[in-house]
Amino acid sequence: MPVITLPDGSQRSFDHPVTVYDVAADIGPGLAKAALGGKIEGRLVDSSYPLEKDTKLTIITERDMDGLEIIRHSCAHLLAQAVKALYPEAQVTIGPVIEDGFYYDFVYPKGFTPEDLEAIEAKMRELVEQDLSVHRELKSREEAVSLFRRMGEEYKAEIIASIPSEEEISLYRQGDFVDLCRGPHVPSTARLKAFKLTKVAGAYWRGDANNEMLQRIYGTAWPDKKALKAYLHRLEEAEKRDHRRIGADLDLFSIQEEAGGGLVFWHPMGARIRRVIEDFWQERHTAAGYEMLYTPHIAHEELWQTSGHTDFYRESMYQPMEDDHQLYQLKPMNCPFHVLIYQGRLRSYRELPIRWAELGTVYRHEMSGALHGLMRVRGFTQDDAHIFCREEQIENEILGILDLTLEMLAAFGFDRYEIDLSTRPEKSVGPEAIWEQATQALRSALDKKGLDYAVDEGGGAFYGPKIDIKIEDAIGRKWQCSTVQLDFNLPERFAMEYVAEDGARHRPIMIHRAVLGSLERFFGVLIEHYEGKFPPWLAPVQVVVMSITDRQEGYARQVEEAMRNKGFRSLLDLRNEKIGFKIREHTLRRIPYLLVIGDREVANQTVAVRTRYSQDLGAMSLDAFMEHLSVDVARLGHNISEED
C-alpha cells in the first residue's frame, strides 16, 4: 500500500489506495477544503487522482501558481459550458490558459457582442452557484471521436485525430457539458470564485490565415475577489499608460501602414530620446571594455545556412532576394556577422576575452495579428553584444555583464526584477562537461552578486545555458529585456579557433547578451513605466520658456538661448496665447520644467519656475535655475514616487 512523501520530507502511510484529496484530508480538514489538485513528478493531477504506489506528492491550493493555472483552466471550461448553454449552435475548439487568464475559441459566425459577454459571464456565475462536480473520464479514440461527432463538435473530433497515439484520451464532464482535455480541473465549479470576461477578438483556426475565422473570448481568473480587483485596477492603469496612445499624444513615433505594419518611424521628439539612450549605452559599454561594430543588413543565404538559422529560424525570416544570381537575406540576428569578423584572422589566447557590441537593426517576419505597437515589430534595433572567451574566463565575464546590466537598468529606473537561470535541455549540443562548467559559472556569478534567482531545469537553449532578467515596471508588470546566453553551437558551426598557450587550437566560448533588448520595445516599456513623464535626463524637452506678453520676447529669447548653450533641450513659446493655456498645454506634453517670463521677471532678471506636477518653485535667477536643472538631469535612476 502507498507511502506518500510530502515536500517537507514527512511521510504518510496508508493500508489502502488513496487519492490526492485523501492525503490532504489525512493532513487536516483545512488542507482538504483548500486542495485543488496535486503535483507528482512535475505533473499536475486532479484531487481525485488515485495514488496506488509510493510517490512524492505536493498538494496544490489556490495560493500556488499551479493552483492558479488549474483555476484558469477550469474557468475556460466554465466559459465554454456557458456559451453552449446560451448559444447551442456554437462549436467549441480550444481553450488554453494564458498569462493572467484564459481564452476559448468558438465557431460562431454571428459573432459575440459586448452584451453577449455580459450574458455569458452571468451564466458562468449561475453555473458556479450550482456547485457542479467535475469528473474525469477516459475514452478510447474511437469512442471520443464518435461522441463529439454526435454532439456536432467536428473541431474536437479533428483535435483528437492530431493527438499522438500513445497519449490517452481524457474528457471532463460538469453537469450536462463534456469537453476534451488533459486536465487537471477544480473538483467543483463552486471553487471558481473570481473571474471576469475581458474582450472578444477574431482568431484563425490553428493560427492559419487560410482557415476559418473563429471568435475568441478572453477572460481572467484569480483566487479571490481582492486579487481580481487588483488585477482589473492594473488593467485600467495599463490602459492609461498605453504607449501607442501616449506616443501619438507626444508625437514620439508612428507605424505608417503605407510603408507596412510593424515598421517604426521615429519622430523628432522620439528620436531625441533614442539618441540619449544610444549615447548612454555606448558610453557605458566603452567604459566596460567593449568595442563597437557596424554590420550590414543583408548577407548571402549561405551564411544563414552555416549558422543554422535557415534550419531553425526560417519561419521568422523574410524570403531571400536575388541579385546577380545570388540569394541574399535580411538579417534576423547580428551574431553571424560578429563571428565573421572574428574569423578574419587567427586569434591568440592573449586577445581573449573579446567584447564586441552593436546597435544592429534586424528584421523578423511576424504575423500581422501578432504586431503590437513598439512591443512586437518587424524591424528593430537590437542592443546586442558578443563576447568570445576561454572556458576559465566565463565567470568573470558573466560578473561583468551582470554589473553592467544592473547598473544600466537602475539608471532607467528599474531596480526590481525577476531572474531565471535556465539549464541544459534534453536536446542540446556540446560536451556535457562544458555544459556543467558553463552552468556552474552562471550560477556562481549570480551567487557572488547576491541575486535571488529561480532555476528553470532544462529551460536553456539547445546551444547553451542562459540567464534571463525580467524587469518590473511601475504597475508591477514583468518585461523580458536582458538576457545572457552561452553558445557552444556557433563556434562549432563556423569552426572558430584561437591559439592556446601550448600552441594548440581550441574553440572559444561565445556569449550572446542584451541589456535593453530591442530599442523599440524598451522605449515602449519606458513610455508605459513613466506614463510619458520621462525623467529630466531622458525627456525630449527638459524646459520650456514661455512669455506672458510680447513685451517679454527679448528676455525670453535670451533665457532660452542660455539654456541651449548649456546643453539643455529647451523650447521657446512666444505665442500670443493666455499663459494659463500655455501652461496647461506644456503640462500635458509632460515637459519637466516650465519657465514663465512676465514683466517682473524681466525687471528682476529672474525666471518663475513651475513643474509638470503643478509645483510652483517660485522665482530664481537664471544661473540658480540652471544649477538646479543640472543636478536634476544628472540624477539617473529617477524615482517615480518622488514626483507622483
Image (cartoon, grey):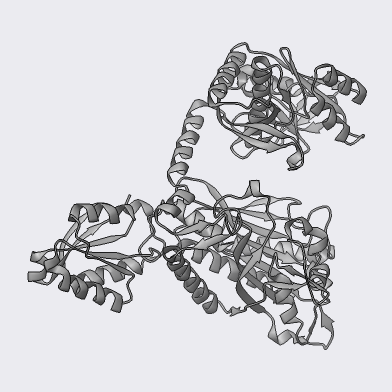
Q: Which residue: 84% across, 85% down?
A: 504
Residue 232: x, y in percent?
Answer: 48, 34
Q: Quadrant of residue 436?
A: bottom right
Which quadrant holds the N terminus? top right
Q: Nearer the viewer, residue 524 or 51?
A: 524
- The answer to which image quadrant residue 42 occupies is top right
- Report whether 128 appears left or right of 626: right
Q: Residue furthest front?
A: 258
Q: Position of residue 99 (x, y in %)?
A: 61, 40
Q: Is residue 58 above or below residue 621?
A: above
Residue 428 point in image, percent of width and height: 83, 58
Question: Closest to the observer: 63 or 556?
Answer: 556
Numbered circles on residues, count: 0
Nearer to us in this view, 14 or 533 = 533
Q: Is residue 163 visible?
A: no
* Spot occupied by residue 369 in the image (x, y as percentages of width and height): 64, 46
- Residue 99, compared with residue 438, is above or below; it is above
Please tell me whether residue 575 is drawn above or below residue 32 in the rendered image.
below
The residue located at (44%, 41%) in the rendering is 237
Q: Residue at x 62, y 32 (%)?
A: 68
Residue 78 sits in quarter: top right
Residue 467 visible (yes or no): yes
Left or right: residue 191 versus residue 253 is right
